[in-house]
Image: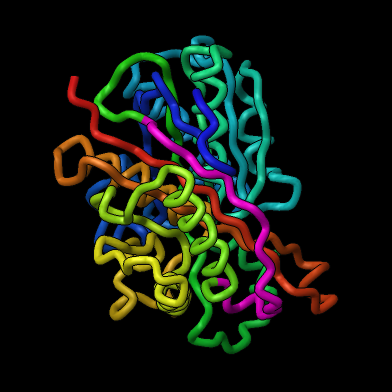
């Protein structure tokens, strides 16, 4: 492991050993449904309430990743993860069922890449052979915390995004596999002085652009280095701002960009407003679709720039602006 430039890291012997993606019903009906390991037919996922449903999603993802890798939990050196609930409660409750060391992390929707880059750093430093990451979100648990009270039924603007119901787990390892974890760039907090909690795409776009710019500068590369540059979750309006910022900064506008919030759903046919969001959104797209595309050779190099709006309900009620962050991680097809 070597620090590169100001905020980036290059890894030597780190691999994505396996991954899992478990979705809710709306996500299964979207364009990427075939790439998930399993999907539930309703948002309760067999639980008695929404929080239990999200715990079930996480534990299903954990068990699926373990099963696919042939490992048992006592062979996992550490679990790193988080969610959108207060005090990352879902992940805390989910992992109480397992005898494993645990680091809980939170950076909103960028928790997926934050967890993976931390796991990669620990593996490359020799901490352990196998480190699991786990991330999730649930539309209803998120809605009643960050948006309207679900009972209120207020009108939602078109700029709003729909929090994904889904969970994903990965096992980051020193054991060679078909996908390498090669690079990462740690983001910094960017506050565009916006306070609309129902327009998080535009709020997070400057953070995504800043991290991408730093990544290019630190590694002295061009956007064409990657077959896919995946942001998440800027969705419709945030993605437009992201590209405009790159143009203003005279960064070659990459044609190979897409956003997890636009890929997870068909925004013309599904009722998701501006697209998808939430920890589960970029997690499902990355650990489901992107992993499959790398394994089958559709892509050789992918950069995932996951973004997070670092707000909480109290600060929003106080009309504070919403700071944002983006963490990036690069996955590369390994020629074993």
Query: Which quarter of the figure has residue 42?
Result: bottom left
Query: Which quarter of the figure has residue 89?
Result: top right
Residue 264 position in % (x across, y down): 34, 61
What residue sits 62% from the left and 18% below the top?
Answer: 100
For the C terminus, the image quarter is: top left
Dominant secondary-structure state across the stretch colored magenta: loop
Residue 49 is at least partly visible in this image: no
Residue 170 magenta-drawn?
Answer: no
Q: Is 177 rendered above or below residue 4?
A: above
Residue 62 is at least partly visible in this image: yes
Q: Which residues are magenta?
A: 181-200
Residue 299 position in % (x across, y down): 20, 45
What residue sits 61% from the left and 34% below the top?
Answer: 94
Render colour scheme: rainbow
Q: Residue furthest left?
A: 297
What residue sits 25% from the left and 66% below the top?
Answer: 255
Residue 312 position in % (x across, y down): 75, 63
Q: Is 209 rendered above or below residue 89?
A: below
Along the line of sight, the residue nearer the viewer: 278 or 295:
295
Residue 67 position in % (x across, y down): 36, 22
- 124 sits left or right of 68 in the view: right
- 309 sits left or right of 72 in the view: right
Along the line of sight, the residue nearer the viewer: 267 or 9:
9
Along the line of sight, the residue nearer the viewer: 62 or 309:
309
- 47 sits left or right of 84 in the view: left
What residue sits 26% from the left and 61% below the top?
Answer: 256
- 318 sits left or right of 336 in the view: right
Along the line of sight, the residue nearer the viewer: 130 or 239:
239
Q: Is 190 rendered above or below residue 326?
A: below
């Amino acid at each position: 492991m070597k620090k590169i430039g100001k905020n980036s890291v290059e890894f030597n012997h780190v691999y994505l050993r396996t991954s899992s993606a478990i979705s809710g019903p709306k996500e299964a009906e979207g364009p990427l449904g075939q790439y998930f390991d399993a999907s539930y037919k309703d948002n309760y996922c067999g639980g008695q309430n929404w929080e239990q449903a999200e715990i079930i999603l996480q534990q299903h993802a954990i068990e699926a990743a373990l099963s696919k890798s042939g490992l048992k939990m006592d062979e996992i050196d550490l679990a790193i993860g988080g969610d959108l609930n207060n005090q990352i409660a879902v992940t805390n409750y989910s992992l109480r069922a397992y005898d494993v060391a645990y680091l809980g992390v939170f950076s909103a929707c960028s928790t997926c890449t934050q967890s993976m880059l931390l796991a990669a750093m620990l593996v490359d430093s020799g901490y352990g052979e196998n480190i699991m990451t786990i991330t999730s979100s649930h539309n209803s648990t998120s809605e009643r915390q960050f948006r309207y009270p679900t009972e209120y039924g207020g009108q939602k603007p078109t700029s709003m995004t729909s929090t994904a119901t889904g969970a994903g787990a990965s096992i980051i390892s020193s054991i060679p596999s078909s996908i390498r974890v090669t690079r990462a760039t740690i983001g910094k907090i960017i506050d565009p002085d916006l306070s609309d909690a129902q327009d998080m795409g535009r709020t997070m776009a400057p953070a995504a652009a800043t991290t991408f710019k730093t990544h290019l500068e630190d590694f002295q590369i061009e956007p064409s280095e990657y077959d896919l540059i995946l942001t998440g979750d800027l969705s419709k309006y945030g993605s437009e701002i992201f590209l405009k910022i790159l143009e203003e900064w005279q960064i070659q506008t990459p044609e190979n960009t897409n956003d997890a919030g636009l890929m997870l759903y068909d925004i013309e046919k599904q009722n998701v407003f501006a697209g998808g969001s939430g920890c589960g959104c970029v997690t499902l797209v990355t650990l489901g679709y992107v992993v499959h595309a790398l394994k089958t050779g559709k892509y050789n190099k992918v950069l995932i720039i996951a973004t997070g709006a670092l707000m909480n309900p109290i600060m929003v009620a106080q009309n504070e602006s919403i700071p944002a962050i983006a963490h990036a991680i690069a996955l590369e097809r390994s020629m074993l």
